[in-house]
Image (cartoon, coloured by chain):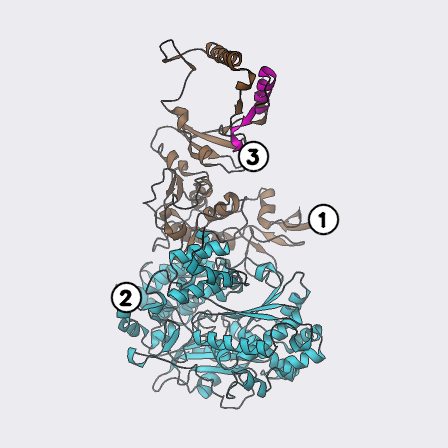
Chain colours: A cyan, B brown
Amino acid sequence: MKISANNESIIDQWKEEPAALLGVLHAFHDRDGYLSEAVIRDVASGLKIPLAELYGTITFYHHFSQSPPGQSAPRVCTGPVCCLNGSAQLLNALKDQGATAMACAGRCDDPIPVLKGHHALRGTDNASLEEKATPLPARNPGNIEECIFANIRIPNRAKFEGYRDSGGYLAVDKMLNEMSPSQVLELMTQSKLAGRGGAGFPTGVKWKAVAEAPGNPKSIVCNADEGEPGCFKDRAILDYDPHAVIEGMIIAAYATGAAQGFIYLRYEYPQSFALLEEAIREASEAHYLGDGIGGKEFRFTLHLRRGAGAYICGEEGSLLNSLEGKHPFPRNRPPFPVTHGFNNLPTAVNNVETLAAVPQILAKGPEWYQSLGLNEHAGTKLISLSGDIEKPGNYEIPIGLPLRTLLYDWAGGPKAGRSIQAVTMAGLSGGYLAGDDLEITLDDPCIRSKGSFPGAGGIIVYDDSRNMVEAAHEAMAFFAEESCGKCFPCRIGTERLTERLARDAGPTSITDWNAEVDDIGTTMMATSACGLGMAAPNITKSLAKYFPDQVTKHVQKSP
Amino acid sequence: MVSSQSSNITLDGEPVSFSAGETLYEIAKRQETIIPTLCYDPRLEAFGSCRLCMVEVDGIRNPVASCTTKASDGMVVRTTSPAIEKHRKVLLEMVASENPDIAVDPLRGYASQELGTLVDDYRADTGRFKGRQSGQSFQDDDNPFILRDYDRCISCYRCVRVCAEQEGDYAINIRNRGFNTQITTEFSGTLKDSSCTFCGQCVQTCPTGALADKKAMRAENDPGEIKKTRSVCPYCGVGCSVDLLSKDDRLVGVQPAMDGPANQGALCIKGQFAFDFVQHNDRLGSPLIRNEAGELEKTSWEIALDRAADGFREAMKTHGRQSIYGVASGRTPSEADYMMQKFIRAGFGTNQIDNCSRA
């Protein structure tokens, strides 16, 4: 089919680019405010994608609109923390502008985010909405040594000059002059750095697998699709220290032999997108990206891509499918991305936080990094703390820090007159901890011993004024909204659990209610195809464990 | 490459050898061990969505989907256990809960009984897990062939995958996500306005009857049992195997033969849906020739063929051998084409032969 003249230049500009689809769709979405039928037909034709497939893929993403007012209408965050801060009222107040709800947009430290056009506003009511920079992470009171945040408060650190002046890119310089790729791999393995997106896979081992896997070009993918409710740590890194992530990716590329990299950034961070675009431009001008990096025969190109509103795209298989322009379902594993990643070629998918730690580790050594953890634990972890707490924000903790120390000594404890009823782990995915189980240390083995997991490090605090069944309902509604629809247990289970937590359906006998909810949760955990469906029942399981009385009251109250 | 060393897994306590690349599901099927599934079609790439084919593997914490898990040497696999059976039953109860009812007429399609059979086998309580229904039927799609009764859809996407992987049409896809997923054409339109060729393969792979054969369903209320008779599609020379569905000796529908050597479950719109001519009132029951008044009347094959031969002779006598031109039907197999050219070349001495499928 003939492509219309006014669409041709955008399509021509993108069609030979790697991972073109998201780029071309955003170009049109930005131009028109929505994706018209004519544009979709032309993109299908230009990129040679079957029309039905492209249409289906576009409908998968929350933020791709197909009609006016499209992206100029406000979208109001109704995530778990914004719910606590009155997002329902704000949404209602903006209804006359065509406002719609969106899932957690990662601004839980400074609610409530509202997206409008290219702007990410924040405020708690219509009058206070403004564009505002990401809150800078506070120092911890004990002056405990940091890794990721060590330099983040240096003014101008986000710019190349400022980064360079505060020791930036020295790790790459040192590496290129003194180290072989295998030495870098060895050093990373020794440091015990593990995936900070939540999976905890040893970074050095992952990179080694990519280095050894056959097939070229290899890729480094930075997973910046920070979609977990209550998680906003990557935004702080990207906004204040973007070059650290870029430097980490360059080191990863050198170690693995990758020639190209992608940063897959979530849609809801337009400010971060602009900052990253600028940082990539600066790094290219300084010859840290492109051909002949450091005067060596080392080539690494970096591409920035923007998601379009889909939590599941933080799952690496979905992310890779999304980058490739496919329907963003998770992939069956094995094979893993280290051998069959982007375009079915070897790929290291690393979280923002993991990559930001790499230059520090290379500069200061693996022993230094290991020593940052408490007891036998290696390194640090960023925690996004939000909800009913005096000082919400991002904190870099030594792994193994007692939760109580973080909550009370670092973050000032609950609001005046309140006590902490529960906290979430892993944003929402780890479910709730309460009672004696708040006496944990923040490390994988300890959190797992309570049936939860640390994940990407989001902790939402609920004080004693909150109804935990309502909180659980909002959490499950999020998982239902974000379930991709591929595997049966997650697609149906998240919906049925949401209905039961809302009392829209389900038994009125507490015994039957518990049996249904438990059976659905158990089967979801055991049989779901990816982490979303496996983790979602942590909400109902922990609710039943810590708050049986609230559950009984919920089930038995008259409708 | 297949390793020359023999590789074995232990399947339900028995050692079984396998070749490289085989999945646990394929090995179990070969061993006649039945594993339930709803999203699997042996012709398609394993998808791993229904999760019913979960099996336990020693050393792996969660059960794995046997359809997507390749065997590796030494794997110890259990295709059933109380825990696995419980998961399967819960999964079936969850699937049943998204549809209004499960029982459908087998005339709807080849695989239409799969969900109902499993629900019965597992004595799944279809009333458990009640809640919102998922799919929404597309009642305004007035094409004469395919019913889009998505109220019964369980989002296994076998239709989408068979359309892409087998037919190469890419006419349908998945709209939205999660519990709101729907099967869709581009811009949610009708099949007629899409690139659908009405081959009917989506209908025949649908495990719930959500996609159904409208033509066969005309006979839903006809008396009599459905009888299947293996035959070969008469339309073209490919020779697709079909199962003719009849009730009381009347042809009511056609289903592709999944084991048909030429088609392996595929048909085209004609073989699948265009069978009305068989019992049509206008269908010729005997040869007709024109009488002296120019009207057609019934006659015997002997007389009719003689009349045709006279016509050929007359043409040749009057206009010469170059006036004869033989065109084979697209429906003929190679043997009949051979006969035709021999007849024209040897019988009339001309090389003017052709086949209608040439164009």
What residue is pinned by disc 2? A557
**Is residue A208 shown to the viewer in this render?**
yes
Q: Is residue A439 magenta?
A: no
Amino acid bearing label 1:
Ser
Disc on res. B272: none
Counting from the top left corner in percent of width and height, residue B169 is at 48, 45
Disc on res. B6: 1
Which residue: 32% across, 60% down? A509
- On the same chain: label 1 and label 2? no
Q: Nearer the viewer, mark 2 or mark 3?
A: 3
Query: Is A287 on the left-hand or right-hand side of B38?
Result: right
Counting from the top left corner in percent of width and height, residue B350 is at 59, 19
What residue is pinned by disc 3? B262
Q: Is residue B341 magenta?
A: yes
Q: Chain of mark 1?
A: B
**Mark 3 Cα shell of 10 Å, populated few (<14), some (14-19), many (≥20):** some
Along the line of sight, the residue nearer the viewer: B356 or A316: B356
Magenta residues, start to end: B337-359
- Please tell me which of labels 1 and 3 falls first in the chain: 1
Vertical comparison of B314 with B63: above or below: above
Quadrant position of residue A79:
bottom left
